[in-house]
Amino acid sequence: MVLHAPQTVGVESSQEICENFLHFFIDKVLSVKAQISQSVLDPSTPVPSSAVFDRFEPVSLLCLQELVAHMKPSGSPYDALPPRFFKEVFLTIASVVQSIVNSSLSSGVVPVNLKHAVIQPLLKKPALDPDIIANYRPISKLPFISKILEKVVYKQLMSFLEEHGILEVFQSGFKALHSTESALLRVFNDVFLATDSGDCVIIVLLDLTAAFDTVDHNILISRLEQLVGVRSTALQWFRSYLAERTFSVKLGEFVSSVASLQCGVPQGSVLGPLLFSLYLLPLGSIFRKHGISFHCYADDSQIYFPLKKINGFSVDPLLRCLDEIRAWMALNFLHFNEQKTEVMVFGGTSETTIIDLGSLAQYVKPVITNLGVKMEANLKLESQVSAVVRSSFFHLRQLAKIKPILSKQLFETVIHAFVTSRLDYCNALYCGVSDASIRRLQVVQNAAARLLTGTKKSEHITPILILLHCKPVHFRIVF
C-alpha cells in the first residue's frame, strides 16, 4: 500500500462479481468487433512462403530439463503442483512430462485441460476507481505444463522462422535482441537523418483496441499455412491449440461459470505474442507499396514519412497508405483506438505551419508518448526527462517510508526496481541531449544513493557512487 501497488481487485469478491467480470470481458470483445466495418478488397500483397514446416521434433529429456529450469514459475491456480515446487521436483516427473509433450507434438492434439485460462482482473492504474469494472484488464493464468508444451513449440517454430527469414524485419515485439529501445533508436535515427537533410518528418502513432482478443482463428490458421508454410501435423496442432479454449474469472474463493474463447490468441501464453506477430505479417507489404517507413512493437505502430518541400510538403501518400491500413485492419477484425492516435511533425521552419495534414490534423499534439517515451517536435526530450525526474522523486519519497523495515540489500533492490530502471529505460536516446537535462537525471541518481546510504546533502556524492559501483548517468548512457 505504501508504494501504491495495484491490487488484484478492489471490489468485494462474490459469485455475482465474478459473473459480471466474465460478461464484461466477453461483451468488450463483441463490442469492438461490432464497430469494425468490413472491407471487400484486401489491399495487402504478401509473399507466400516457399519453406515448409510440417512436423515437430520430439523433445529430449535433457532439452526439456534445461527449458523448464529457465522458465518463470507462473501457472494456474488449479495446477496440481505449484509451479515453483513443480520445478524443484521436475527431475522426478520429467519422463511423464516428456511423454505428454511428445504425444501432443506427434498427434497434433493439445489436451483440453491445458486450454483453460483463469482470469484474475487487475486495475489498469492504481488511481482508477476500483468499483468500475471497465478500469480492469484481464490477466490470464494458464497451467504451467501447458506453458512447457508451448515453449517447446515456440523454440522449434522460431528456429524455422529465423532460418527462412519469415518474420517482419521491422517488428521488434517479442523478439530476441529487440526491445522498445531498439525500435525507438531506429525511428529516432531515421528522423534525425531526414531533418538534417532539410526535410520535415511526420510521425503517426497507431494503437489497436483489444488487438490480441479479436484475432480471427480461421485467418490466423490461413496465415500460418500460406505465409509461414506450416503444414500437415504441425498445422493440425495449431488448429487444436486454438480450438475449444475456455476461461473463467476467479476472485478469492469465488469462480465464475466457464465461457468459450471464439477468437483471440491466449494472453498470458508463450505462443500468443508470436502468433499475433505472424497475424500482422501482411501489413509490411502495404507500407512498402506506398514507400512509408514503419516500425512496430506488438500492436503499437510507428509510421513516419519525410515531407519534402519539392513536393509541397504533401502528405497524400501517407493518407492513402493509412486508408489501406484501416481497410486491412477491418478485414482482419482489428480496430484502431482513435483516442490513442497521435501525430507530430518534426523539423522544418515556419513554412511547416502551412502543411495541410488533412484528416490527421485532429491528432496533432505538442508532446506524444511513443512506447513510453515522451517526444517533442524539437527532439530535445525535455518532457521525457521531466517525467522521469518527477516519477523518480515520487517513488523516492514513498520508498523513504519503508526504509526502516528493509535490510540494506533489499532496499537497494527496491531502489533499482523503482528508480534506476526509470533512469535506464531507453537511455540510449539521451545521447546528444543537453547537459542541463543530464544534470537533472544525475540529481535523481544522487538522491537515490543518499537515501540508500543515509549520506547527508553536504557530503560529496562521488565517493558514494564509487562505493556502490554505480556509474554516473552520463556514463550509463554511453555504456
Image (tube, rainbow, N blue to C red):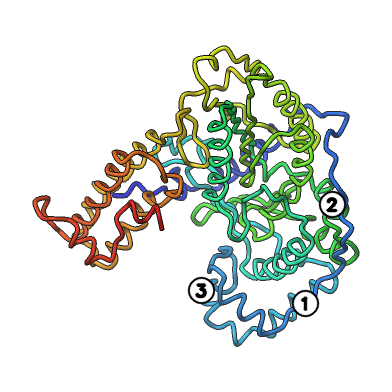
With respect to residue 444, does 160 lie above or below?
below
Q: Nearer the viewer, residue 370 or 289?
A: 289
User: What is the distance, in whole Å, between disc 3 and disc 1 at their CAs?
Assistant: 23 Å
Which residue is under mark 1?
Answer: 102
Q: Nearer the viewer, residue 438 or 432?
A: 432
- Considering only order in the chain, which callout, 1 or 2, is on the residue closer to the N terminus? 1
User: What is the distance, in whole Å, between disc 2 and disc 1 at their CAs?
Assistant: 26 Å
Query: SS class of the residue under badge 2?
Result: helix
At horizontal 73% and vertical 67% (from top left) the residue drawn is 159
Mark 1 nearby-residue class (10 Å; few <14, some 14–19, many ≥20):
some
Task: Judge from the rendering whether residue 399 lies leftward or rightward of residue 116; answer left or right.
Answer: left
With respect to residue 8, does 230 lie above or below?
below
Residue 72: give x, y in percent of width and height: 54, 68
Which residue is under mark 3?
Answer: 84
Q: Which mark is drawn over residue 227?
A: 2
Foreground disc of the pair 3, 1? 1
Q: Are marks 3 and 1 in contact (CB under 8 Å)?
A: no
**Identity of the residue furthest to the top in this view:** 354
Mark 2 nearby-residue class (10 Å; few <14, some 14–19, many ≥20):
many
Q: Are marks 2 and 3 in contact (CB under 8 Å)?
A: no
User: Which amino acid type is shown beneath numbered disc 1?
Assistant: Asn
